[in-house]
Image (cartoon, grey):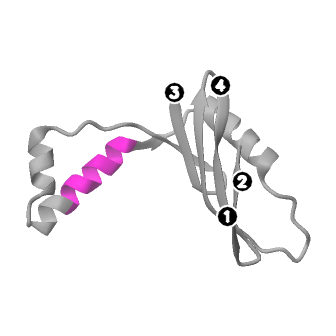
């Protein structure tokens, strides 16, 4: 199972699960903001990795198939496309704004 996400059209990342050590959990409870900030940056770097070329192609194809058709005066803004790939089958949710209104497509 892979979790894929895009918040910018054409850019896909894979979201990995990160297991925290007991020391890291303790640091998250720390009152030292710099320590917490550094740890959060490390966790983000471990969690968010570039999707493979194959996964990117698959995710782009699915995204393009579910993205709504736009009229020439429509304003479309991607909020987030989140997909789960299980045995090359993609399911998930597309969050976007169309002409200023928030919409979702589940697939």
Give me the residue at 51% from left, 38% from top.
3
Q: Position of residue 10 (x, y in %)?
A: 66, 51
Give me the residue at 8% from left, 66% from top.
31
Answer left or right for 31 relative to 13: left
Disc nearer the start of the sequence (2/3):
3
Q: How many marks overall?
A: 4
Give me the residue at 28% from left, 47% from top.
43
Q: Position of residue 96 (x, y in %)?
A: 67, 64
Q: Secondary structure at mark 2?
A: strand
The one of 89 and 33 positioned closer to us in this rendering: 89
Q: Are marks 1 and 2 in contact (CB under 8 Å)?
A: yes
- Gap between marks 2 and 4 measured at Cα: 20 Å
Disc nearer the start of the sequence (1/4):
4
Q: Which residue is mark 4?
A: 88
Q: Secondary structure at mark 4?
A: loop
Specify the quadrant that holds the C terminus. top right
- Gap between marks 4 and 3 measured at Cα: 9 Å
Q: Position of residue 49 (x, y in %)?
A: 44, 41
Task: Choose top left, top right, bottom left or bottom right for residue 70.
Answer: bottom right
Label 3: how many Cα within 10 Å (few below 14, some 14–19, many 20+) = few
Q: What residue span does the magenta drawing correspond to?
A: 37-47
Q: Are marks 4 and 3 in contact (CB under 8 Å)?
A: no
The one of 57 and 23 positioned closer to us in this rendering: 23
- Gap between marks 1 and 2 measured at Cα: 9 Å
Q: Which residue is mark 2?
A: 105
For residue 41, which numbered disc appears in the image? Answer: none
Q: Which residue is mark 1?
A: 96
């Amino acid at each position: 199972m892979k979790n894929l996400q895009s918040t910018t059209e054409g850019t896909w990342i894979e979201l990995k699960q990160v297991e925290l050590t007991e020391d890291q959990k303790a640091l998250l409870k720390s009152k030292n903001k710099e320590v917490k900030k550094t740890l959060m940056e490390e966790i983000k770097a471990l969690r968010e990795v570039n999707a493979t070329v194959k996964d990117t192609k698959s995710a782009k194809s699915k995204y393009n198939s579910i993205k709504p058709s736009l009229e020439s005066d429509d304003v479309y803004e991607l909020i987030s496309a989140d997909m789960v790939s299980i045995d090359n089958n993609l399911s998930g949710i597309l969050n976007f704004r169309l002409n200023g209104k928030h919409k979702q497509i589940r697939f």
